[in-house]
Image (cartoon, grey):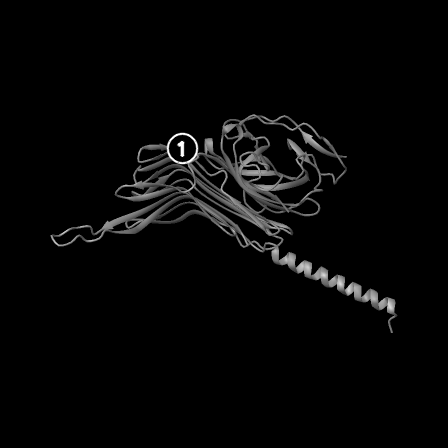
Amino acid sequence: MLSQCTQQWTTRLAAAFAVLGLSAAAAASAAAQTAAGEAYGAYVQTPEASQAKSPLAVLPSVGPGSGDMAEASGEALSVLGAFSSDLLTSVTSGAVGAGTAGAQSVATVAEVSILSGLITASRVFAVTSTSRSGSTTISNAYGSTFENLRVSGVSIADNVAPNTRISLPGVGYVVLNEQVQHATGITVNMIHVVLQTVTGGECTSLECLPEVTATVGEIIVGSASSSVR
Amino acid sequence: MRERRGFTVAAGLLTAAVVGSACEQPEATAVPDVGSPLFWVGCPAAKKFTGGGRIDPGGQKVTFGFNIHASNTCEPLKGQLQVVYHPTQSKYHAGTTSSGGSITSFASFPSPEGGECGEFRGTVRAKHGNGEWHTHDFFAQACDNGEPGSSPGTGPDTFWFEVSGEGPGHGSTGPTPLTGGNIQAH
């Protein structure tokens, strides 16, 4: 039979372990479990042509205590009438540690020409980073930029503001430095062209048909994303 | 004594910023002198480093990504590296399992900025523009000095890549603050 003193210590130790167990469980629930990342140079989907994400780097499954990296590159890429470029590179890496986790992705494209020169750039850089420490997640797209970007013949600043939208008459519009933040990470598409058609609008003596704008395709150049869950 | 080995490097990419201070550290496991420009012996700091992003040494853009995991005896167990020097469209690849490029040694140490640094070296497969693939010796150092975004455009993390050889696409970036991306020590 245990003495009263021993029983008291046993009770105290059990309580202490219970508290430690709860703390560990709470910490585990707050700790990141997976890191994810993706980067690619170009994606084209138009009525006339298509190109899957290329060169595509997707971070393999990264769980607690592990890290990994994926990379891809291409010497050049051409999609008739829609897109052409020189060197394209993609890389993504990430890891999940005991108290921190992170993922980062980079896509670069050189000598870009979109829609037969409607949009050109010497270089495009898409960079994202997501890190998590405890329950705090930080994401940004610092390092994303252009060199010698021109849209419809107009020079655009390298550090164009995020989500800058420019109309492309007869074509649709383009979003430059498109940044999509979400709870677990970020995606940046440096050039996102949305192709549109407009139907209707014709008038008779009785009425005018409403104009209907429809999206018929898109072109994305320089895309990087990273997240931690 | 742990020592940080050093020699002056040729600057093909840009002028190397050689760190010449803090050359003496505590004792650690001895490894062969493999001729690294700056190489710490042993790995008293983290043994897993992951990173990626962009640096602008000398105003030129370099992008990179890597992941390396070393054993308790500093043996590289798993690793990959991609570096692109954009002015010459030079690509560099290395891995612990890739053919033609390999990561053969690793070391880590406390960063002077309060974080942790990892160094690794070996051979990279390299291609400059439309040239042929070939190999070079390389050295890389990555320092985790804080969270990304805490000082955008100026780090706080740093990356350093150096590749042997002469002419454009060779030389050293020197330790350069990240313009974007992140380095993480685990």
In this view, the residue farthest toward the left is: A205
In this view, the residue farthest toward the front is: A206
Q: Which residue is mark 1?
A: A157
The residue drawn where x is 50% and y is 39% is A142
Residue A29 is left or right of residue A7, and the answer is left
Percent of width and height locating residue A71: 50, 45
Task: Specify the subunit that label 1 lies on.
Answer: A
Percent of width and height locating residue B167: 51, 26
Q: Can see residue B93?
A: no
Percent of width and height locating residue A90: 47, 44
Asked if A38 appears above or below A112 in the picture, the reply is: below
Percent of width and height locating residue A74: 43, 42
Residue A155 is left or right of residue B76, and the answer is left
Mark 1 neighbour density, 10 Å: few (under 14) some (14–19) many (20 or more): few
Task: Name the quadrant containing residue A170.
Answer: top left
Q: Can see residue A140?
A: yes
